[in-house]
Image (cartoon, rainbow, N blue to C red):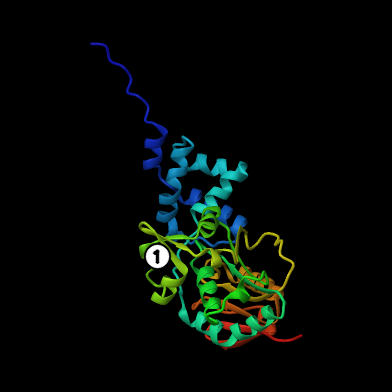
Amino acid sequence: MIETAAPEASASALAAGAALDPAEFRAIAAILHEEARIRLPESKVTLVHSRLSRRLRDHGLGHFRDYVALVRRDAAERAVMVEALTTNHTHFFREQHHFDHLRTHVLPTLRQRAEAGQPVRIWSAGCSTGEEVYSIAMTLAEAGPDTGWLSRGHVKLLATDIAPQAVAAVARGVYDETAVRPIPPAHRARWLHAEGAEHRIADELRALVTARPLNLFADWPMRQQYDAIFCRNVMIYFDDTAKAELEARLVGLLRPGGHLYIGHSERLIGPATAAMRSVAQTAYVKEAA
């Protein structure tokens, strides 16, 4: 009987069982922080292993050290890694009090501005898959049965996220039954169209929204001022230095009298605090210069 050597394990099999040692985890965490300022605590080792094992398989790599070397030299793979490690969790009308405040305290002025031919701009920063920006759009449409003021080109909503796949979902505007359950029945009847097991946001609202990929710590192409910025449950992933930097930049893009909405567990720190006044739970208005 002639013995043959056992076949080498495939890279995909190795990847499935590849260990992520502390040095490799720290290297990945450092790259993520450098690219997106996201802080990755050691408690996320299992999450990182789970989300990146597929990338090892896709590249035929058997060890995380090989993947670390790849992302260090390959900008495209670094972007994919950042997207894989970014949490895209949200739902329609999350933190309802913000939409109540927008409707009762901000919307009347925004409508007056739009009807006078003045631009109205709202930004959903870290928009995930779009539930937030479409909740904003539905809230604006609550101003009355006449929504013509929304369709004259003066009102524009910007939705940005670091993850291109999330941005693509915003542009599609299609959600499954579980996702749309938090939407009030009246809104669902008016602004969603059933397509089999899925629901599409009405064209009238989708036309208000421009969705773009954007790293919040890269250069921003926007030069106009905003009437409201929603940046909620995004800064929980940053350290205080990054939070202060981002908040100052957000406030810098608000027009005087503009509003900033942040997550329920977040707070303003650094230079932004001097320019903003609290008007509701985690809602702030920019003071006039």
Q: Which residue is mark 1?
A: 179
On the rendered structure, is 184 left or right of 110?
A: left
Rendered image quadrant of residue 267? bottom right
Task: Decide: is 31 above or below 70.
Answer: below
Residue at 64 percent across and 73 percent down: it is 247
Residue at 57 percent across and 78 percent down: it is 261
State the image coordinates of residue 99 (x, y, percent, origin top left).
51, 80
- Most extreme residue toward the top, as rendered? 1
| 225, 107: nearer the viewer | 107
State the image coordinates of residue 270 (x, y, percent, origin top left).
66, 78
Residue at 56 percent across and 41 percent down: it is 69
State the image coordinates of residue 184 (x, y, percent, origin top left).
41, 76
Q: Is the C terminus in the top left, top right, bottom left or bottom right quadrant?
A: bottom right
Residue at 59 percent across and 64 percent down: it is 207
On the rendered structure, is 93 left or right of 230?
A: left
- Most extreme residue toward the left, as rendered? 1
Task: Decide: is 189 above or below 73.
Answer: below
Q: Is residue 47 visible?
A: yes
| 25, 37: nearer the viewer | 37
| 36, 133: nearer the viewer | 133
Q: Residues within 10 Å of mark 1 (few under 14, many from 20)?
A: some
Task: Decide: is 161 above or below 287.
Answer: above
Dot 1 lies on which element? helix
Q: Is residue 26 visible?
A: no
Q: How many marks?
A: 1
Rendered image quadrant of residue 156? bottom right
State the image coordinates of residue 77 (x, y, percent, origin top left).
56, 44
- Most extreme residue toward the right, as rendered? 289
On the rendered structure, is 236 left or right of 17?
A: right
Q: Is the N terminus in the top left, top right, bottom left or bottom right quadrant?
A: top left
Tell me the kind of residue under disc 1.
Answer: Ala
